Amino acid sequence: MNSAPDPSPRRSCLLRHREEDDKSGFLALAGYTLQNADQLLSDLRTQLLPLDAELFDQTEYGPKYRIRGTLTGPNGRVLRVLTLWMKEDATGETKFVTLLPDKL
């Protein structure tokens, strides 16, 4: 898939502690923090976008894809991740939706 993660508040959601659906603790295992959020965006671009994307849903706004892979963080630790993306029919843009620990 050819796109870049949207540098929107999504990175803040991923790296800020939340009571429900927290991902910051998982990402912290690999050394990602709010202070190096740009590194997370860069790593998503370089480490995951080149991998094969699997179409898993077609919505009224466009197709959704998942990309499974490994993410090597700033501290060298490798995380198995599942990322979700959507290609908007209206704009043709592929946008980052979320990241989850991959339990496969």
Image: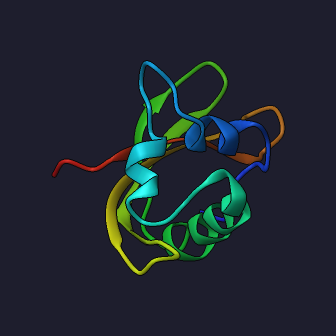
The colour scheme used here is rainbow
> Of residues 6 and 66, which is closer to you in this image?
6
Decide which of 85, 57 is in the foreground and name it.
85
Q: Is residue 79 above or below residue 60?
A: below
Could you tell whether 34 is left or right of 9 in the image? left
Q: What residue is rendered at 63% in x and 31% in y?
A: 62
Q: Is residue 84 left or right of residue 87?
A: left
**Is residue 4 in view from this perspective?**
no
In the displayed structure, does residue 89 sit left or right of residue 46? right
Q: Position of residue 2 (x, y in %)?
A: 67, 65
- x and y, in percent, of residue 49 in the image: 55, 67
Quadrant assignment, res 33: bottom right
Residue 99 position in % (x across, y down):
47, 45
- Picture residue at 57% right of the left edge, 41% below the top: 14
- The reply, left or right, for residue 31 in relation to residue 29 is right
Asked if 43 appears above or below 20 in the picture, the reply is below
Where's residue 80, x and y in %? Answer: 30, 61
The quadrant of the rendering that contains the N terminus is bottom right
